[in-house]
Image (cartoon, helix red, strand yellow):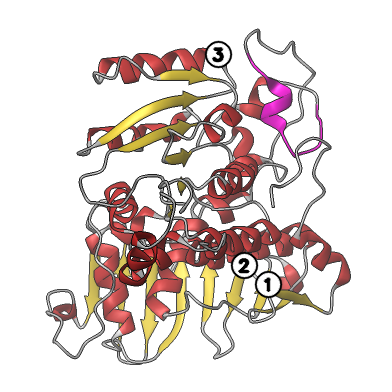
Amino acid sequence: MIKQNLTRRGFLKTGATLGAAIVGAPMILRAETLGLNGHVGPNSRVNLALIGFGKQIGSHVGVTGLHNVHPLYVCDVKSWALKSALNQMNSRGFKDVKGTPDYEDIINDPAVDAVMVVTPDHWHAAISLAAMRAGKDVYVEKPMTLTIAEGQAMVEAEKRYGNIVQVGSQQRSDATFRKAAEIVRNGWIGEVTHVHTWLGTFPEPVLQPEEPIPEGFNYDKWLGPTPWEPYFENRVKGDYGGGWRSFWEYGSKKNGDWGAHHFDIIQWALGRDHTGPVKFVPKGFEGEEYAYYEYADGIRVVRDHPDRKGYMIRFFGTEGEVCVSRNGEIESTPAELVGRPLSPSDTQLYRSTYHQANWIEGIKTRKPTICPAHVGHRTATICQLAGISERLARPLQWDPEAEQIIGDTEAAGWQDRARRAGYELPV
């Protein structure tokens, strides 16, 4: 009998042995029984569901243009967003796509192989975990989770079920950021001393009078696990300049917005995907001009420091520096580092040129993506700890091995959050 917890990746690694066992077995095992969902070859069709059709979905719809990727469902709790999603799919030539306001319809359909979770942050974990438990592969927008406990659950599910997970930290699939990370990782600027990065700020949310819930909007489900609050439009808007992103209930503000990108690149460049910082200090504490976090070896990452030469991230080293932003912007000191090729003995980082395509390739080959759950969790943890420190207006000490806030019971309580009845986290 095949063990229930056999992962799909493990199946492929032991294919010859398992194949012999199946030949001699008195029954035929279906792909679903093995947790494979039919993804056993590079030419298999990937049946996809896209969950959440707000502003962020625009960068993901293009995945339906990849070879053998077929959308089966679109999902949103707003009827007008769902109608727009179906129109987009129809305009791309997919006439048989189903629309549903309930992601559970997707989870319960064995025909769906993979899901893209493009909801507000507070829904990332529950939908992803439900999909993983059902044997589906997952692309989840950054930050991967709202809380540290959710991230730990995601990592455990990834191990248990063997899903192919891609976290939407797409800067890892950008050649410029990879080059900057390789410059740092290979010691071309010497020992890193500190890093400056830009996140910016969201406006503080303004509580407004309660408004009627629009017809066709399941507002209760949009709130999901978070506390019930009166509806007004700006609470649920997906604006990049505010909306739900300004509320602690639904995200980690700028720590989870741009921090999920830039902290992620810093982790990658420093070779810390398996660990994290040990100290977080908020802006304003004992006169601190800028928020920062610090690793055990003393490397300090300072948020919103103006000394960045206009770049999003600036790495300072004992023998030079490298600055990097989007749109191919990169410079170094010495200047020739940017054009210096890697030698065979240099560290060469995972190369991906298209984040979503890297995920689809992983689904077909069962090879890990450039940003699986255990990597996305470490970055999201930094976002969440920086947020907790900011909310409590005091420093935090963090043990990255035990994954525990040290010496602060109140702060440690924020590693998880209470969930509304009926919206418990799948296990």
Q: Which residue is mark 2?
A: 291
**Along the polypeptide, which appears first: circle 1 or circle 2?**
1
SS at circle 3 = helix
Q: Is residue 118 magenta?
A: no
**Along the polypeptide, which appears first: circle 2 or circle 3?**
3
* Residue 12 visible within the image: yes
- Categorize mark 3 by other alpha carbons within 10 Å: few (<14), some (14-19), many (20+): some
**What amino acid type is highlighted by mark number 2?**
Ala
| Nearer-the-camera pick, 82 or 288 | 82
The picture quadrant where one finds residue 58 is: top left
Residue 254 pos. (x, y %): 57, 51
The magenta span reads 217-229
Whether the residues at callouts 1 and 2 have beta carbons within 8 Å, the answer is yes
| Nearer-the-camera pick, 297 or 87 | 87
**What amino acid type is highlighted by mark number 3?**
Ser
189 relative to 85 in the view: left or right:
left
Q: Does residue 396 lie above or below 233 as drawn?
A: below
Residue 292 pos. (x, y %): 60, 71
Q: CA distance from mark 1 to mark 2?
A: 6 Å
| Nearer-the-camera pick, 194 or 73 | 73
The picture quadrant where one finds residue 217 is: top right
- Categorize mark 1 by other alpha carbons within 10 Å: few (<14), some (14-19), many (20+): many
Provide the major secondary structure of the magenta segment. Answer: loop
Q: Which residue is mark 3?
A: 79
Q: Residue drawn 53% across and 71% down? A: 302
Q: CA distance from mark 1 to mark 3?
A: 43 Å
Q: Does residue 141 lie above or below 210 as drawn?
A: below
Residue 36 pos. (x, y %): 41, 51
- Farthest front residue in view: 26
Q: Which residue is mark 1?
A: 281
SS at circle 2 = loop
Q: Is residue 222 magenta?
A: yes
